[in-house]
Image (cartoon, helix red, strand yellow):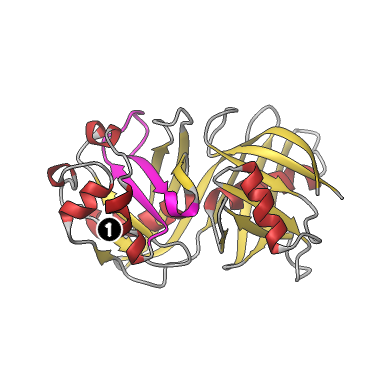
Amino acid sequence: MALSYYILDVFTERPFGGNPLAVVLEADHLSSADMQTIAREFNLSETAFVLTPTSAGHTARIRIFTPTRELAFAGHPTLGAATLLAELRMQPQLNGERDAIIALEEEIGSVRVGVRLRSQAAAYGEFDAPKATQALEPLSEPEEISAAVGLIPTEVGFENHKPTLLRGSNTFAFMPVANLAAMSKVKVGPLHWTRAFTSRGVHGVYIYTRQSVRVQSAFHARMFAPDLGVPEDPATGSAAAGFAYVINEFDDLPDGTHKRAIEQGIEMGRPSTITLAMTIARGKLETVRIGGHAIRVAEGTLNV
């Protein structure tokens, strides 16, 4: 059986930046084991498989795999798969402008992605992230947590930002670091990592600082998920969605809509930009919206 696949770079406007994603089309006949094997073969942070939706009101159903396991939700596969489906299925307009709503069925539920297509430009998509059902938890034991990422305790934290954990379909630890110099030193220490994060059921550790390389960025971030087979991720939409709760917790945002640009992947040579929009009402985070560009870089046939 031959299946078509595409490789996209997500959260970037230029090829060979951002987070690479494999999307396999017409994957209904693949078993879960087949999908896991294919994801391991691509060996990207995630591979998305497109299936027939169970509801006629949805565009497609997708399943998302890292090289080692399936995820209920992830940001860059959601955005990348949606922009690809919009490009493949929409008829071109005379002015080269197309807009679409792509409704995806995921393990976590339905996710609607607004896609904007313009001629001679990378596709842009944005979606409302699933709401967190848990509150932020403080992360104590500063010596072990800092050692897990190759830092010393005085390099962890800035202003009033402290390490926290947000549990959900993907559980992330959020670790503020003092500056870009500390960020450049980050390195996973396996023994400390197991005690500090694996034992807590943490899927990934999102490390951030307010210092940035680009003037337009509000935060600089790195994300490590070795337990998922992802040593480091160039752009992490699901973690950015959780990060909105961290920003609201520590930055005390006033009511209204706030946008922040987050840069990631720079240390990996795959610079990315995630647009994070947060709506605050009566001091609480009401909606989180993730946006970014995606561009196709390759396509081919998978023989299975």
Q: Which residue of the protein is positioned furthest toward the front in this rendering?
A: 191
The answer to which of 85 and 97 lies nearer the viewer is 85
Residue 101 seen by the camera: no
Q: Which residues are magenta?
A: 202-228
User: Which residue sits at x=43%, y=55%?
Assistant: 241
The answer to which of 110 and 191 lies nearer the viewer is 191
Residue 168 seen by the camera: yes
Q: Position of residue 140 (x, y in %)?
A: 18, 61
* Residue labelled with disc 1: 196
User: Which residue sits at x=78%, y=36%?
Assistant: 300
Q: How many marks?
A: 1
Q: Position of residue 39 (x, y in %)?
A: 64, 49
Residue 179 to residue 49: above or below: above
| SS class, disc 1 | helix
Q: Position of residue 41 (x, y in %)?
A: 65, 44
Q: Which residue of the protein is positioned furthest toward the right in this rendering?
A: 1
The answer to which of 14 and 20 lies nearer the viewer is 20
Residue 44 picture quarter: top right
Amino acid at circle 1: Ala
